[in-house]
Image: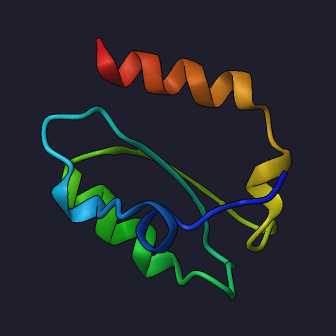
Amino acid sequence: MGATDTLLDHGFDVRQIKDTPLVVWYADDDEDCPPSHGVWLVEKFKAKSRVFSGLGHIGAAFLDHTKFLEEVLDAAS
């Protein structure tokens, strides 16, 4: 199983999201995807966010996804 790019592989453009609860997790030390992308998403969608330090690009993938889903559900309520 591999990751896919939502824009390139599926034609999904995050700029088209409307009225959808969003929680953005990102690392402030990410060298692959600038933290400014996370900031942009949070501001554009008035999303909740969690910013991590010392995890780099892939670090958040190994965090507690149950907690992430709880935050998404909380944002939806």
Residue 68 location in percent, x, y?
61, 31
Location of residue 56 (image quadrant): bottom right
Query: Does residue 24 appear to the left or right of 25 in the view shown?
Result: left
Query: Does residue 64 appear to the left or right of 4 in the view shown?
Result: right
Q: Which colour assignment does the render follow?
A: rainbow
Image point (30%, 45%), residue name: 47
Image quarter in which the C terminus is found: top left
In depth, the one of 77 and 18 nearer the eye is 18
Question: Looking at this rendering, what residue extends furthest in the bottom direction?
Answer: 31
Residue 39 location in percent, x, y?
37, 68
Image point (86%, 47%), residue name: 62
Query: Does residue 39 appear to the left or right of 1 in the view shown?
Result: left
Image point (74%, 53%), residue name: 60
Q: Is residue 77 above or below residue 75?
A: above
Image point (56%, 18%), residue name: 70
Location of residue 58 (image quadrant): bottom right
Residue 67 location in percent, x, y?
67, 24
In depth, the one of 9 and 27 nearer the eye is 9
Q: Is residue 30 above or below residue 26?
A: below
Residue 18 location in percent, x, y?
13, 43
Query: Does residue 40 appear to the left or right of 7 in the view shown?
Result: left
Count of numbered tags: 0
In depth, the one of 38 and 17 nearer the eye is 17
